[in-house]
């Protein structure tokens, strides 16, 4: 995608949603970290349902450690891979208490050393909690980057590096939110809704999906 087209791509998404944010519910940086860890291979909707009661009870790493692994499991048992996730959340909470005074470190490299925290999770936390210009490439962004031609790559890291290189300055902080939401609600995996896409004319995806018969109602 050409430089001018990339700018226009983001400009249109920004115009439609000037202040994008994560759909995960949280009250502080620590709760955000936990929510993102729990969201791996799970939906934000499912995570939010599980964490509402949990986050009323637990706001700090110390409180999570006090809750314990079995107590945490009771809150998150509706989430996929909850056994492994509970183990990781307790372990990372213990580390935060022991090594960081209960605070979430503002460093991506340090975050990725925590149990259950990969590069994508660290990028989300750095961006959402601390305002860093990071690009968390999940399945939605990977698909959008490749399908549209915005940032094609063979793996998430390639897509991330292209986004870092090509995303214009005015849009860098919010770019990954726009792309996630675009992939989640319009540029869907099985059947992208090209007929209502605000950037369809900039997109390299050739078999554009036509509008369904009930398009006016679906939109």
Image: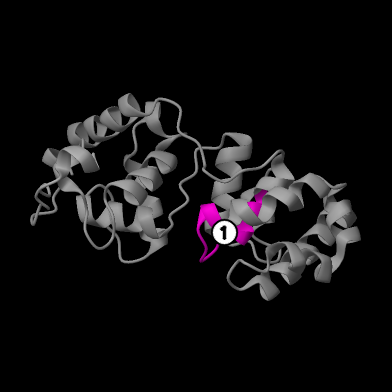
Specify whether residue 43 is painted magenta: yes
Q: At 36% across and 59% down in the image, what residue appears?
A: 158
Q: Is residue 129 left or right of residue 189?
A: right
Front residue of 134/17: it is 17
Quadrant of the rendered structure where residue 84 is?
A: bottom right
Q: Position of residue 11 (x, y in %)?
A: 28, 28
Looking at the rendering, the stretch of residues picked out in magenta corresponds to 33-46
Is residue 1 shown left or right of residue 206?
right
Tell me residue 155's x, y (percent): 36, 65
Horizontal side of 36 relative to 88 (left or right) equals left
Seen from the viewer's position, the closer of residues 35 and 108 is 35
Which residue is found at the position 83% from the left and 66% from the top?
A: 71
Total number of numbered discs in the rendering: 1
Along the line of sight, which residue is nearer the eye, 155 or 174? 174
Q: Main secondary structure of the magenta part?
A: helix
Front residue of this view, candidates 184 and 137? 184
What residue sits right under mark 1 in the picture? 39
| Spot occupied by residue 121 in the image (x, y as percentages of width and height) | 57, 55
Horizontal and vertical percent position of residue 167: 34, 38
């Amino acid at each position: 995608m050409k430089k001018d087209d990339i700018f226009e791509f983001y400009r249109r998404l920004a115009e439609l949603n000037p202040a994008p944010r994560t759909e995960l519910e949280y009250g502080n940086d620590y709760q955000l970290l936990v929510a993102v860890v729990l969201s791996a291979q799970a939906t934000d909707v499912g995570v939010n349902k599980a964490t509402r009661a949990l986050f009323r009870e637990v706001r700090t790493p110390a409180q999570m450690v006090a809750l314990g692994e079995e107590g945490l499991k009771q809150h998150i048992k509706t989430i996929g891979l909850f056994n492994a996730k509970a183990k990781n959340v307790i372990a990372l909470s213990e580390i935060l208490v022991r090594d960081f005074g209960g605070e979430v470190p503002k460093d991506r490299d340090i975050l990725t050393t925590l149990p259950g925290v990969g590069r994508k999770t660290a990028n989300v936390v750095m961006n959402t909690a601390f305002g860093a210009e990071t690009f968390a490439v999940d399945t939605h962004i990977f698909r959008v980057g490749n399908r549209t031609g915005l940032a094609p790559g063979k793996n998430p890291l390639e897509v991330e590096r292209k986004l870092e290189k090509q995303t214009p300055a005015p849009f860098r902080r919010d770019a990954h939110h726009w792309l996630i939401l675009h992939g989640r609600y319009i540029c869907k995996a099985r059947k992208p809704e090209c007929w209502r896409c605000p950037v369809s004319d900039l997109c390299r995806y050739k078999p554009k999906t036509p509008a369904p018969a009930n398009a006016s109602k679906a939109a």
